Image (cartoon, helix red, strand yellow):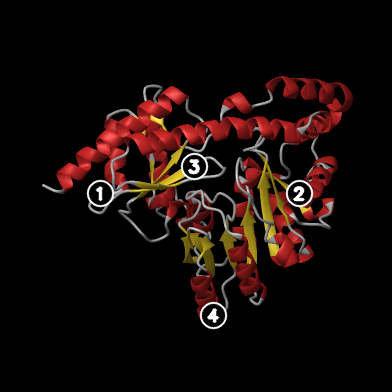
Amino acid sequence: MQLKMSKKIMKPDFQGEFTASILAAAASPEIISFAGGLPNPVSFPIREMEAATQKVLTEKGAMALQYSSTQGYPALRAWIARRYETMGVYGVEADDIIVTNGSQQALEMIGAAMVDPGDEILVEDPTYLVALQSFHLFDPTVLPVTINADGIDCDKLEQTIKAHPDAKFIYVIPNFQNPTGLTYSRAVRERAAAILKASNLLVLEDNPYSELRFSGEGGNSFGAYLGEQCCMFGTFSKIVSPGMRIGWICCRNKELRAKLLNYKSTADLHTNIFCQLVLAQYLEDNDLDQHIEKTKRLYKQKAEHMMACMRKYLPEGVTFTPTEGGMFLWATLPEGITAVELYRAALKKGVAICPGDPFYEYARNVRTFRINYSNSTDEAIETGIRILGETCRELMASSQD
């Protein structure tokens, strides 16, 4: 039969097609993959989760296996609400939290609630590729705002807001931004917050990496400056387990929260309640901060090793941004070489990277690429970076012929 698909699902998906091909190529066990963003399984609290699961089945088995409320398990929402105090945000209540199927669902929920075809939205340039994918489902006009070494370009932000007063929202990742790994300075946070406060933009702050800071100092959430104007996304994927698929939206605007709940109820009724109960039990019985400290020590060692290898093996002209946390490094190739060229050439030698192209709304054939350090052995990191260095030299030589 000939299916009559919707125009929405048949739209070209540059981000999805690009990343699917990269991940498919990197799936081979023979490939050293720096392309994804996987936490290291060494950090997973397997024994503690086993104990939490047994306790939940013994004490709350019927609840864990039954339908539940759309908003999420109250004890878990209360824990998340209290956690915001560590980010400088006070007064968050359990009722402000919606538990989602990973923070990725939060992106889709916001798009459904906020965007009609043609509506303008602002994003960082570059930005998280899955955010672009999710927003594209609703046919917005995307307005990119440049990212500098200390955060979003506030002059460009102000100009864009003035030129597009009807834009619906701005999506930002101020801590260890994906893909660049950059973090907003305090001065940029304060100026950007003042610019945004004077606008009618909803601010979507995605914050999956801030708890993975292993050196330096961070800054407060935009939620501390903007109140209910800031809708904050979070996830347990990077600090506990991605497989549980538990994230959240902190939405202090009651009208928007009601619409988000209506949409989620239609989309999936509720997030996996069994996993919510197990996670809540784990958080009650264990010291999450202690667990995060172990993860940070691991990632600090991985990051420092990868940066040392990059300094050792990458040729002059290839630069990268040092990191103080998160899971990624962002590198730039010299003129005359694109990241896609490096990706293809390195993959033939058994190393996968993620070219920068899918992180941009418009720019193509860029010289930037993202590499992940969290999920590789030290040996794989050294071997992979050495091969990348050799490949870069070959491409640089051929570009000069």
Q: Is residue 254 above or below residue 340?
A: below
Which residue in the protein does label 2 denote?
Answer: 86
Which residue in the protein does label 4 denote?
Answer: 162
Q: Give the mark nearer the N terminus: 1 vs 3.
A: 3
Residues at discs 4 and 3 in contact (Cβ within 8 Å): no
Of labels 4 and 3, the one closer to you: 3
**CA–CA distance in space, label 2 to label 4:** 33 Å
Which residue in the protein does label 1 denote?
Answer: 337
Callout 1: 10 Å neighbours few (<14), some, many (20+)?
Answer: some
Q: Give the mark nearer the N terminus: 3 vs 2.
A: 2
Q: Give the mark nearer the N terminus: 2 vs 4.
A: 2
**CA–CA distance in space, label 4 to label 3:** 33 Å
Amino acid type at mark 4: Lys
Query: Residue 24 at what x, y percent from top left?
Result: 40, 33
User: What residue is rendered at 39% in x and 25% in y?
Assistant: 28
**CA–CA distance in space, label 3 to label 2:** 23 Å
SS type, badge 2: helix
Name the side, left or right, on which 249 lies relative to 117.
right
Of labels 2 and 4, the one closer to you: 2
**CA–CA distance in space, label 1 to label 3:** 21 Å
Amino acid type at mark 3: Phe
The residue most toward the right is: 59
